[in-house]
Amino acid sequence: MFQSAVASSGFPRRGVSKAVLVYDDLRARIISLDLKPGSRIDKVEICERLGVSRQPLAEAVARLAGERMIESSRRRDVRREDFAGAVAEAAFVRRGLETATVAAIARPSRRNLQRLDRALTYQTTAVKAKDVEEFYALDVRFHTMLFDRLAMRRVAEVVEASRAQSSALAASCCRRRRNQATLREHRVILSALEEHDPAAAAAAMGAHLDQA
């Protein structure tokens, strides 16, 4: 369930290439810790399960290696054991871009504010149901909606990659302890956007990501 939630929570997947399909699958398994640090990626299993050839798999592996989530070589591809440095860089990039984003969109339309508020209502339901996987998917969706408003696809893609690196170190139990706090922090961000206050929105986002 966690893998499907992650895969469905980012950008639209309709019409995506096989390489993106493999990338999403592998990234979800890394984030969920289904692929343990140091474990070898079974290329034959992946190709058979997803019905793809080696070429899309190679493209996906190269992309994940570029994001420093796996180590790739001619002999083997494995889930990285230690990528704390990569996570620190990812958190730095994500904070800079997401705080700039909310400052830039601090005058959203009433319709967009209603969509964000509705997303937080769904998060509230997930918290009450103690549905960690659903909450994570909705958490990602909340942030994605902000980038939809910014309309800068490349910025959104960079942040999505940074988020994947950060999430890969967080086990489900850790996220469960943060869900209620995350929801409160999202509410503060939304409140600043409703007030059309760029500085407050950026400060709220920064405080939120500092705790993520």
Image: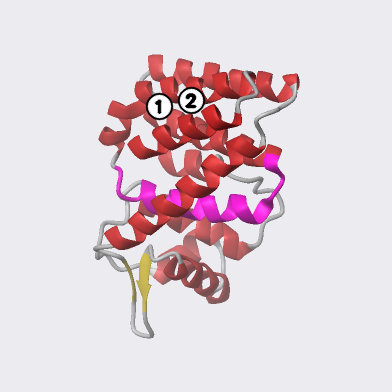
Residue at 34% from the left image edge and 35% from the top image edge: 211
Residue 116 falls in image quadrant = top right
For disc 2, the marked residue is: 186
Q: Nearer the viewer, residue 91 or 128?
A: 91
Q: Is residue 79 above or below residue 75?
A: above
The answer to whether one can see residue 7 in this image is: yes
Dot 2 falls on a residue whose secondary structure is helix
Q: Position of residue 47 (x, y in %)?
A: 49, 67
- Span shown in magenta: 150-170
Q: Position of residue 200 (x, y in %)?
A: 52, 27
Residue 89 falls in image quadrant = bottom left
Pointer 2 and pointer 1: residues touching (CB < 8 Å)?
yes
Q: In the shown orientation, is residue 156 left or right of residue 206? A: right
Magenta stretch mostly in which secondary structure? helix
The answer to whether one can see residue 212 in this image is: no
Q: Nearer the viewer, residue 106 or 167?
A: 106
| Amino acid type indicated by mark 1 | Thr
Q: Position of residue 142 (x, y in %)?
A: 55, 32
Residue at 37% from the left image edge and 29% from the top image edge: 132
Is residue 164 highlighted in magenta?
Answer: yes
For disc 1, the marked residue is: 182
| Amino acid type indicated by mark 2 | His
Residue at 56% from the left image edge and 63% from the top image edge: 51
Q: Is residue 128 above or below residue 168?
A: above
Residue at 52% from the left image edge and 40% from the top image edge: 99
Dot 1 falls on a residue whose secondary structure is helix
Count the numbered circles shown: 2
Screen quadrant of the N terminus: top left
Residue 55 falls in image quadrant = bottom right
Crowding around mark 1 (Cα neighbors within 10 Å: few <14, some 14 to 19, many 20+) is many
